[in-house]
Image (tube, rainbow, N blue to C red):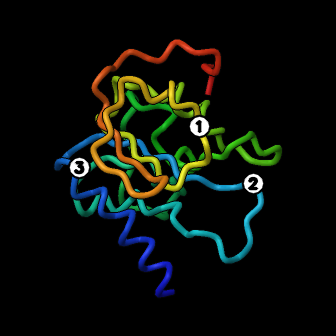
Amino acid sequence: MWLYDRSYDRELAALDHVPEGARMVSFVGRSCVEPWSMTRLLHVPGMAVVRRRAFSNDQWTMAGAQLLTVRYNEGWPFIRDPSQVVTRFRCGHEVWRPINVALANFPRDAFDYVWLIQPPPYDANLTKGLQPVWRNGRSVLYRVVDRAQPLVGTRKKS
């Protein structure tokens, strides 16, 4: 648990660079099959809601389970759990997106920041128009500076 706590603290340092009220899409790396001792970082982006009053796409939707409702059509389909989960390749039994598909398809005009948390390897060309404002190891927080969608072969319907 101490090690998990340390990893949370390292990742949450990114929020010091997110302004109040920001619209943030997060992509948390995951493998198709994980052991019990997985990273447990899948909902760390939700701390942006309470610490920065920011939008976070990791909130789940279950009838009667939340006191909040996601109403952000501009960000569709990157507005709720599991849109934050990304993998290196498509997992046959999951709806998670490969990181390159997520980076190519999230609506840049709907988000101010992109937070990659322990992402799998990805095509750096897909981060053109995104300015890094914080980095820790593989994790990086980008500010969206160019709202044009990247013109690459990985764009497809999400």
Between the C-alphas of marks 1 and 3, the distance is 23 Å
Image point (34%, 33%), residue name: 111
Q: Name the residue nearer the viewer: 108 or 49.
A: 108
* Cα–Cα span, label 1 and label 2: 16 Å
Task: Please state which of residues 4 and 138 is positioned toward the viewer in this rendering.
Answer: 138
Taking depth in this image into account, of 63 and 70 the one nearest to the observer is 70
Q: Residues within 10 Å of mark 1 (few under 14, many from 20)?
A: some
Label 2 SS: loop
The outermost residue toward the bottom is: 2
Asked where in the image residue 148 lies, by quadrant, the reply is top left
Q: Which residue is mark 1?
A: 122
Sequence-earlier tag: 1 or 2: 2
Q: Provide residue 79's location: percent of width, then percent of height.
A: 45, 41
Q: What number is the disc on residue 25?
A: none
The quarter holding residue 100 reads: top right
Q: Which residue is painted at 51% across and 65% down in the image?
A: 41
Q: Sort mark 3 into few (<14), some (14-19) or many (20+) by Cα contacts within 10 Å.
A: many
Q: Label 2 vs label 3: CA separation? A: 30 Å
**Residue type at numbered disc 1:** Tyr
Q: Earlier in the sequence, mark 1 or mark 3?
A: 3
| Disc 1 and disc 3 in contact, CB within 8 angstroms | no
Q: Which residue is mark 2?
A: 32
Residue type pointed to by label 3? Val
Outermost residue on the left side: it is 20
For marks 2 and 3, the one nearer the N-term is 3
Around disc 2, counting alpha carbons within 10 Å, would you say few (fewer than 14), some (14 to 19), or many (20 or more)? some
As drawn, 44 above or below 128: below
